[in-house]
């Protein structure tokens, strides 16, 4: 997995002699500012749409200033992928872990995923757009994208397996098949809502989840809590 972009940490701001902490903190803040603008640009135009020149104009820096923090356009693209993944984890994965083990947690993961996609319908999902851009283009950027998506798939597969182990889903379920169908629902949601502008796609995705679960749910699973706390949407 590609390393995450630098952020301001305790180590970064700890004095190492008079005046040493300030440049370190300023450098990290500048990098974060560049990354924020790059993420916004990539969400609109795709990873291949990232332009160092446009980015420099947006944040009021020179091209050489941007390159001082990211040695190449490819390095910037990888940093954007890592940052997107980190934010996805904060919005979708980590909050769902607070739900009870089993079906409630799996339901929360999918619901938060659906809501995240719905927030991104106007800007675009880097996982999905990146797959289109780099599906047949080997290299470090594609590797970073694949690594992040595999990490998310592994987390979902684990949640499905836990739901089985908790007795909420049948013991003989095909975890990979359920994962495949859930991911397919998200891709259909993105296609129908963002591209086709078909009303009701969000609810169809939720209905699809219930159909997938209904095919293997147990009596114990039917008694599991279904409520998912509201997710606060953040302005993009």
Image (cartoon, helix red, strand yellow):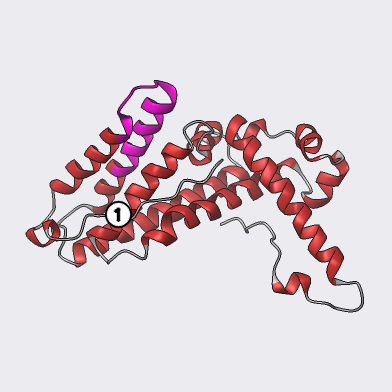
Residue 82 appears in the picture as rendered: yes
Crowd band around label 1 with a 10 angstrom C-alpha radius: few (<14), some (14–19), many (20+): some
Q: Position of residue 94 (x, y in %)?
A: 43, 61
Q: Secondary structure at mark 1?
A: loop
Please report the residue visible at 55 percent of the width from the left and 32 percent of the height from the top: 133
Q: Position of residue 114 (x, y in %)?
A: 37, 42
The quarter holding residue 228 reads: bottom left
Q: Magenta span has 96?
A: no
Q: Position of residue 84 (x, y in %)?
A: 56, 48
Magenta part, dominant SS: helix
Span highlighted in magenta in the image: 182-202
Front residue (pair 172, 189): 189
Please report the residue visible at 15 percent of the width from the left and 65 percent of the height from the top: 167
Total numbered labels: 1
**In the displayed structure, would residue 13 be above or below residue 150?**
below
In which quadrant of the rendered image does the N terminus lie?
A: bottom right
Task: Tell me the residue that label 1 is attached to.
Answer: 228
Q: Residue furthest left?
A: 219
Q: Residue 188 vs residue 213: left or right?
A: right
**In the displayed structure, would residue 14 be above or below residue 7?**
below
Q: Position of residue 11 (x, y in %)?
A: 73, 74
In which quadrant of the rendered image does the C terminus lie?
A: top right
**In the displayed structure, would residue 221 be above or below residue 136?**
below
Residue 75 appears in the picture as rendered: no
Front residue (pair 205, 3): 205
Please report the residue visible at 71 percent of the width from the left and 53 percent of the height from the top: 32
The quarter holding residue 62 reads: top right
Front residue (pair 52, 100): 100
Please report the residue visible at 30 percent of the width from the left and 48 percent of the height from the top: 179
């Amino acid at each position: 997995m590609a390393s995450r972009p630098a952020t301001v940490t305790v180590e970064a701001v700890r004095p190492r002699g008079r005046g040493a902490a300030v440049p370190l903190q300023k450098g990290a803040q500048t990098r974060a500012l560049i990354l924020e603008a790059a993420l916004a640009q990539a969400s609109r135009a795709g990873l291949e749409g990232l332009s160092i020149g446009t980015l420099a104009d947006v944040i009021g820096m020179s091209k050489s200033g941007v390159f001082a923090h990211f040695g190449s356009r490819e390095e910037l693209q990888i940093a954007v992928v890592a940052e997107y993944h980190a934010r996805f984890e904060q919005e979708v994965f980590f909050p769902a872990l607070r739900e009870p083990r089993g079906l409630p947690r799996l339901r929360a993961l999918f619901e938060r995923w659906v809501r995240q996609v719905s927030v991104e319908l106007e800007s675009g999902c880097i996982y999905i757009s990146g797959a289109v851009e780099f599906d047949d283009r080997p290299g470090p950027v594609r590797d970073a994208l694949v690594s992040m998506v595999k990490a998310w798939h592994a987390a979902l597969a684990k949640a499905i397996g836990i739901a089985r182990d908790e007795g909420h889903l049948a013991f003989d379920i095909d975890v990979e098949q359920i994962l495949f169908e859930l991911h397919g629902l998200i891709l259909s949601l993105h296609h129908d809502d963002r591209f086709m502008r078909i009303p009701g796609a969000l609810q169809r995705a939720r209905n699809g989840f219930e159909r997938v679960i209904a095919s293997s749910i147990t009596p114990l699973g039917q008694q599991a809590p279904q409520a998912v706390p509201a997710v606060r949407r953040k302005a993009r």
